[in-house]
Image (cartoon, coloured by chain):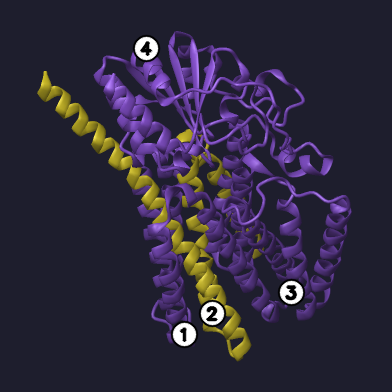
Chain colours: A purple, B yellow
Amino acid sequence: MSLLDPVWTSLLYLAAAVFFILALRGLSSPRTARRGNLLGALGALIAVVTVFLAARLDNIPWILAAMAVGSAVAAPVARRVKMTQMPQLVALFNGVGGGAAALVALLELGHADNPWVRVAIVFTLLVGAVSFAGSGVTFAKLQELMTTRPVMFPGLPVVMAVVLLAAVAAGVSVVLTGSLPLAVLLLLLGLAAGVLLVLPVGGADVPIVISLLNAFTGLAVAASGLVLGNVLLVVAGTLVGASGTILTRAMAAAMGRSVAGILFGAFRGGSTAGSTAVSGRPVRSSSPEDVAVLLGYAQRVIIVPGYGLAVAQGQHTAAELALALEARGIEVDFAIHPVAGRMPGHMNVLLAEANVPYESLKEMGEINPEFKTADVALVVGANDVVNPAAKTSSGSPIYGMPILEVGEARQVVFLKRSMRPGFAGIENDLLYEPQTSLLFGDAKDSLAQVLGAVKAL
Amino acid sequence: MDGTALLTITVLAVFVGFEVVSKVSSTLHTPLMSGANAIHGIILVGAIIVAGQAAEPWILAVALLAVVLATANLVGGFVVTDRMLHMFHARKDAAKTGAAADGGGK
């Protein structure tokens, strides 16, 4: 016996759906973002409690145990993960959600008595599997379990076409016959397609693919809602699918790229392939003391933080250096590129973690005209986001991406680990300019040495 | 619920989804993606229904796997989003205390 009658069930699901809409709207504005996320969690809680009260369920102890296992695995990881590794964690959570949707669809095949329901099942199976496998590959790339470069092999477009054709054939057969073995085959083909889709995507494009796969999972969840006749799943999944699509386009636009270009660029050989070659041109390398003198006698310093800073956990040292310079009467700002770090907005999260005050974080549009008046631009562990090739060389993989115009500053100092090119794998001509000097080493160590030298001035 | 009603709801939800995020600043792209990611963890509801109706052991096993995966998506997604946003919050507080300290110094 169920405790709730269908009307109440529908009303509670409606409440959960409203909370999800409020959550997405809240997350779109910094002031309301945290409350938005909590509203989303509340909506989810209402929905989960409702399903236990509304449907006649067997196996409840098993289900509760499975939920305990899922929470026990995910919550500590989510709480402890380093913020630099957060993008791959989001990819992982997205992938398991897609996998869950595919499994639900697979099991519902036995109950599907009408071909339209089987169409929704086929869609969920395929898209959920693509999302699961694709997210797995993006996780491996971001975690650097495998190369971050695009992986291409000569027959890739052909293999992809064969897999997709086979998937269509299997899908049509499942719709017509409802055969379980064919559905499992479709699931496997979906997994293969997910891997093949993401392998050729490289470097800085990976976060955009996470966002796209996030939208895919949303669509798979919506389709599984059609399968189960559950309005909440339809609404929540569609919301995520639609907002995820907009978000993916916004992210791609921030990098001056198109979503189609990212997905299919590599098939045409034009993704962020870059070159691994490091040319032997001379650079001006510098000592921490030299950098300290440059900074300490400047009037205006702009710090450009990049992923290298985050991965070295140097945010706190950078914040200290900014304070030390400000104590000498120097105007210091942080210039934040929209895609600094590994995801759009990632750098804001990382600097917020280091308690860098909000007012000294300047967005790209605001800070770019100010580089002309800066004595020193200090680039810490960033490369692609300041690479003038994005403006000047139309053949470059990052051509068209808006950049921070650090070249306009009187002096440019790069703190870099090595001459190795950045995430997108392209050499930066700015490194060889006469006004540029380089200090090699781990971003945090270099910053600490510069900080010590500034204090000793 | 009949097909056309579900279709109507789906189409309306598409427009709501487009509309609610249309003005997001790039600062919030990552938390928004993560929050949306948590919301599709609601597939947990579907996984629970399937597991609750499972009559055969293999179906139950697969359904429970789906429950584990969906719970990880849902719980982990909201927790990691909250952590990200907590830092924005902490930053606001830090700025406030900084401003207060400045005021005291003058």
Q: Chain of mark 2?
A: B
- Percent coordinates x, y for residue A444 in the rendering: 41, 38
What amino acid is at disc 2? Leu
Residue with the mark numbered 2? B64
User: Which residue is rendered at x = 61% and y = 35% of the image?
Assistant: A422
What amino acid is at disc 3? Asn
User: Which residue is rendered at x = 34% and y = 35% of the image?
Assistant: A317
- Percent coordinates x, y for residue A421 in the rendering: 63, 34
Q: Earlier in the sequence, mark 4 or mark 1?
A: 1
Residue with the mark numbered 1? A62
Residue with the mark numbered 4? A298
Q: Is residue B21 above or below residue A15?
A: above
Query: How far apart, in angstroms, are the residues tagged by discs 4 and 3?
Result: 74 Å
Q: Is the residue under label 2 in contact with that under label 1 (CB below 8 Å)?
A: yes
User: Which residue is rendered at x = 75% and y = 69% of the image?
Assistant: A188
Q: Is residue A357 above or below residue B57?
A: above
State the residue in front, A226 or A416. A416
- Percent coordinates x, y for residue A307 in the rendering: 50, 38
**Most distant residue in the bottom direction:** B56
Q: Chain of mark 1?
A: A
Q: Quarter of the image holding residue A235?
A: bottom right
User: Judging from the image, what secondary structure is the residue with disc 4 in?
Assistant: loop
What amino acid is at disc 4? Ala
Observer able to see residue A12: no
Q: Earlier in the sequence, mark 4 or mark 3?
A: 3
Callouts 1 and 3 on one subunit: yes
